[in-house]
Amino acid sequence: MIYLYWYLGIGVSVLVLIYGAQRLTKKSESESLHDLLDAVNPDREKLSFRILNNIVAPALAAVAVVIFWPVAAYMKITEHFTKKNEPALEEEREFAVERGHLQERLTVQETEARETVEDPLGAVPNLPFGHLNAAWRDFLDGCSDGDELWSFTARWETTWGQKELLAGYVLVRNGCPGAHFLTVREWC
């Protein structure tokens, strides 16, 4: 019987250690995430849901850790060592215009004439690129002497395999495409 007490005592100690490690490394749920989860699952506000997920489930997990503490300790130790050896998540590649994407060399005046929005109802300003005119002006502020303005079209595949058709305008400096202004983004 003494062995059972020792076994359960070690189980409680492991439970306390695992709980403490979890509390130290766990990130708190942000308010915006909490609101999103509430919107997706309105049952989260019900008392029965809160009792089941905030009281019953953790209590059952605690009992399982106390009873099966060798397995829980093994899992926590392997989790700790594998996290250090895991490669970092692959970052999303950023689109960049290449020389093969270039279509036609244009002047700023030709581009603005081509992209001037004419809305008979007056909901969009009668300016190049409409509501995006300020962004267009910021894009042109990055233009220096000797830069060329080109239109471009490109097929692009994201890191996650999503295929897109991108089009717009790019500043070409010394034959190399640089900053771009995206006007079309269609998923293929």
Image: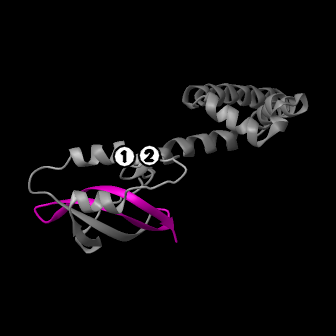
Circle 2 Cα neighbour tier, 10 Å, few/some/many (<14 / 14–19 / ≥20)? some
Work out which residue is located at the far front of the displayed protein and give it.
120
Q: Position of residue 143 (x, y in %)?
A: 18, 50
Q: Distance between the residues labelled 2 and 1?
A: 9 Å
Q: Where is residue 106 in the image (x, y as percent from the top left)?
A: 22, 65
Give the residue number, with chain letter if any, for mark 2: 125
Residue 179 versus residue 72: which sits nearer the camera?
A: 179
Q: Residue 183, position in %: x, y? A: 40, 59
Instruction: Name the quadrant containing residue 102.
Output: bottom left
**In the image, 8: left or right of 27?**
right
Most foreground residue, 67 or 151: 151
What residue range appears in magenta?
159-188
Which secondary structure dominates the residues rendered in magenta? Answer: strand
Mark 1: few, some, or many residues within 10 Å (few <14, many ≥20)?
some
Residue 133 numbered mark, or none? 1
Q: Is residue 172 magenta?
A: yes
Q: In this view, does 74 lie to the left or right of 89?
A: right
